[in-house]
Amino acid sequence: MNTINNSLRALTCGMGALAITAVLSWSFVQTTSAVPGGAVPAVRMAKLTIQQRHVWFGQSQPAVLVD
């Protein structure tokens, strides 16, 4: 009975590892594949937004640590 449990556990772990490998491989292929037909792919850029801070809320100057 112990041999059957160990075999099923090993089979389950192996199938899980194969499933994870397949998903990660497919994701990598999708993100790195070229566009068919030579079309120019859309450029994806990170968008940086800076939020305005109100001076009258909190400290207007950064705190200074003094020994």
Image (tube, rainbow, N blue to C red):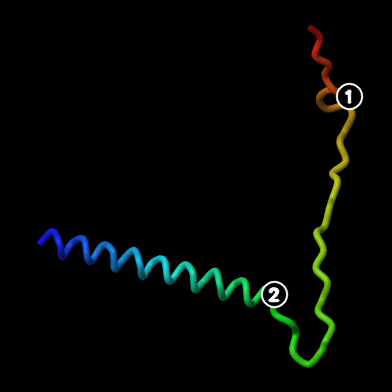
Residue 61: image quadrant is top right
Could you say which disc has been placed on residue 4 in the image?
A: none
Farthest-out residue, left: 1
Category of crowding for the residue at label 1, using alpha-carbon neighbours closer than 10 angstroms: few (below 14), some (14–19), many (at least 20): few
- In front here: 35 or 51? 35
The residue lying at 29 percent from left, 68 percent from top is 11
Q: Position of residue 22 (x, y in %)?
A: 49, 73
What amino acid is labelled 1 in the image? Ser
State whether residue 41 is above or below residue 62. Answer: below
- Nearer-the-camera pick, 7 or 31: 7
Q: Determine whether the residue tagged by mark 1 lies in a helix, strand or loop.
A: loop
Q: Which residue is mark 1?
A: 60
Quadrant of the rendering where the C terminus is positioned: top right
Q: Where is residue 1 drawn, in percent x and y?
A: 10, 62
Residue 8 vertical placement versus 40 (above, below): above
Residue on which disc 2 sits: 32
User: Horizontal placement of 57 versus 17: left or right?
Assistant: right
